[in-house]
Each structure stands twice: as C-alpha cells, then as structure tokens.
Amino acid sequence: MKALAQIKPPHALKIWRIDDKDSAHLRMDTHTLAQAAVCLRAGGLVAFPTETVYGLGADARNAEAIARLFVAKGRPSDNPLIVHVSSVAEAECIVSQIQDVEQRLMALFWPGALTIVMPVRAGAVCPAVIAHGTRVAVRVPAHPVALELLRVAGIPIAAPSANRSGRPSPTCVQHVREDLNDRIDGIVDAGEAWMGIESTVVEVDGDQTVHVLRTGGITAEMLIAAGFTVAHTASPRHPVADMSTAPRAPGTKYKHYAPKGKLCVVEGAPRTVHRYIQKRVDDDATAGLRTAVLTFADQENIAAYRADMVIFLGPRGEVAPAAQRLYGALRACDSADIACIYAEATERTGMGAAYMDRLLRAASYDCVCI
Ligand code: TXA
Ligand code: MG
C-alpha cells in the first residue's frame, strides 16, 4: 500500500478552450475561465493567451508556484518576470510609486503590449519574481481572454512567455505543448496570439525619459508621436542600442529564440537578396544539408526559390503578418530538421525594429548586407 501511495498519478494536463470570436461567447466562458483561475489561485501553472504571445502564469505572491515556474521553463533565476494585472488600480497595489510619465503611458497604452518597470511595493510579490531586486515589470494585456482570466483570478499573475528558455515564444497551444506539456497544470486555449512578438519593456528615469529595454508592439515611433522622450537601451548588441549602456532587461542578455539550424539574415535589394539566398541554398543542398527560406516574396517568387522548405512571411513591406508568423516558422524549421535557414530582412522602423531584433537574436547576429 505504501509503495502504491508513493506512485504519482500520470500528469493530467487540463485544456480550457475558449472561443474569443465574439464577446457574448466570452461571457459564457467565464465559467471555464473560473476553473483556470482556481488552478492559478491554488498555486498551479497555467498557460494563457495574450495579444503578444502565450504566457505561463503563476500567482506572483506564491513562492512555491514561482519556484516551480522557473524550473518548468529552465529559466535563470536572475531573469525577473512580468507581473500581469487587469487594471491600473491593481498595478497601483504592486508598485510603490508612479511618476506622471508612467501614468500617461498607462493611460495611453494599457491594456496593451507595453510593460513598465517601476519600484515594487514591499511584499506585493515574492522576491523571486523580481529576481530579488527592487523594481517590478507590470503589464495589463489587451487580449480579452487574458483580461477576463486576470479579473476572475483577482491576483497578480507572473507570466513569462510559455516556452522553455532559449526556445521561440509560443504563439499557439501546440507550441506551448511542445515545450511544457508535462511540466505545467493547464492551458487556456483561445487560438493564435495576435501579434506574435513580446511586449515592449520600458523604464522611466528621473529625467522623465522613457528607456526602451526591449522593443515590441508599442514602437518607439508610437511613443515619440505621443510626446514622450525616448532612449533605446534594448541590448548592447542591438543595432539601434546605445552601445555604452548595459542592458537593463536582464532577459535581453541571454541567447534567445535560437532554432536548431543555422540562421542567416540577408538584407538588401529584393532581387539581389533572392539571387544570394538561392546560391547559398544550392551550395548547402550540394553539401547534403536541408535548407529553408523565410521570404516576403510573392507567390510567383516563392516558386522561384528552390529549397526543402519555403515559408511565406507575408506581403513585402508588411511587418505585422511576418511578426505573427516568425516564431511558428522557426519552430517549423526545427520540426523539419532544417540545417540552414535564410531569412529576408525587413525595414528596422516601427514594428520592424522588434521583428529584426528577434530575427537577429535567432541568427546570433549573422546578417549579410548585400
Ligand atoms: O509580451 C510579453 O511581454 C509576454 C507576455 C506573456 O506577456 N511575456 C514575456 O515575458 O515576454 P518574458 O519573461 O519572456 O520576458 C520578460 C522580459 C525579460 O527580458 C525580462 O528580463 C524583463 O522583461 N523584465 C522583467 N522584469 C524586469 C525588471 N524588474 N526589470 C527589468 N527587466 C525586467
Ligand atoms: Mg520569453
């Protein structure tokens, strides 16, 4: 009997499906979300959709749950987590002070893909969430399912992206399951995340300058257009970063989003890029290597690429569809055992800055400008 009692039951991952197509249905599904909320309140690890990527949620006040979360992700303990809340009022409960500029950022961009790092209120979250520091990153997500889950749970939820550390962030439930299936308690499934790239992380200094620690869906141009003074400190290796400044979002110092194959980004005039990539692909194929191309070329040009895999990112000049597809494309290359991946570059303005940041990280900054 004793031996039997020690045997753990097989892990049963719960999937709560929500159809977020219409808000009436979402209201009905509050009952389903309540089950996910109960799991979170009991210290469970629950993945859920946000408008950026899927997050892996845990009660930010529960040290045991947060410790499990770090283990499940294989995340270094010096990399703090974003705390998700459903309103500005709830954010006020976990930070000790809000400056005018931060107040304006919240009013303009919340709910939304903007994370603001502010001084933590003593005891509001467990120390591991903020990597034993003094500041906490806070965000109110815009996805209706995420907002409703946070509202029903009524607790601050720490939620990093729901991937194993070093893997691309998940944009759908299948990605979450690939990485975390037997390591978490449940997943709220509401289809694809909309943006596909993580939130912008900012911090406001004493001079009221908004420092962009990680680029994302809320672009520098949007912040500047709204009247803020903006400085880039995203990463010492990012092309737009101030090289003299150390990264302040610790996560940006780690190698990220790396596919198994070697990724090379190619920048230049479309025809030249096409010729260059096809030549590299042909050489790789001759050497017996499996190849993939991530391209903005239209249908006609896709046919012109000869590779084991050709992934259409979206119309040239449109970054949003490409951003939504990027991580899925990198995962597809892994599943197909692709050894060499070539990706066409985009403009680095607007959302293109975040897109190129993630793409270049995935490529370990291997970028050919022709
Ligand atoms: O869109 C997103 O932000 C997604 C969804 C789930 O909300 N979350 C996400 O979390 O991307 P994560 O853990 O993968 O990335 C959080 C980033 C990391 O670079 C981390 O270092 C930074 O935010 N960060 C978190 N807390 C911080 C703090 N107190 N100070 C500075 N940077 C912080
Ligand atoms: Mg992440």
Image (cartoon, rainbow, N blue to C red):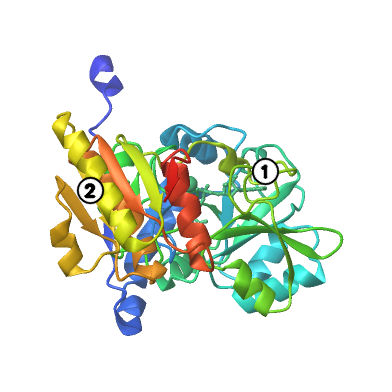
* Amino acid type for the residue under numbered disc 2: Gln
Of the two numbered discs 1 and 2 on the same chain, state the one appearing first in sequence. 1
Q: Amino acid at mark 1?
A: Pro
Near-viewer residue (60 or 274): 274
Q: Position of residue 36 (x, y in %)?
A: 38, 57
Q: Is residue 143 above or below residue 330?
A: below
Instruction: Report which residue position mark 1 lands on.
Output: 247
What is the tally of numbered marks visible in this picture?
A: 2
Specify whether 61 is left or right of 18: right
Decide if residue 188 is in sight here: no
Name, please, the residue furthest toward the right: 207
- Residue at disc 2, secondary structure: helix
Residue 60: horizontal and vertical position, in percent? 58, 48
Report the residue marked by disc 2: 278
Residue 188 in picture, x, y percent from top left: 33, 58
**Position in image of residue 361 (x %, y %):** 47, 43
Q: Residues within 10 Å of mark 2 (few under 14, many from 20)?
A: some
**Which of the pair 66/40 is nearer the observer?**
66
265 vs 136, left or right, is: left
Residue at the image position 22 percent from the left and 33 percent from the top: 10
From where the camera sits, is residue 331 visible?
A: yes
Q: Of 340 and 253, which appears nearest the observer?
A: 340
Location of residue 177 with respect to 73 vertically, above or below: below
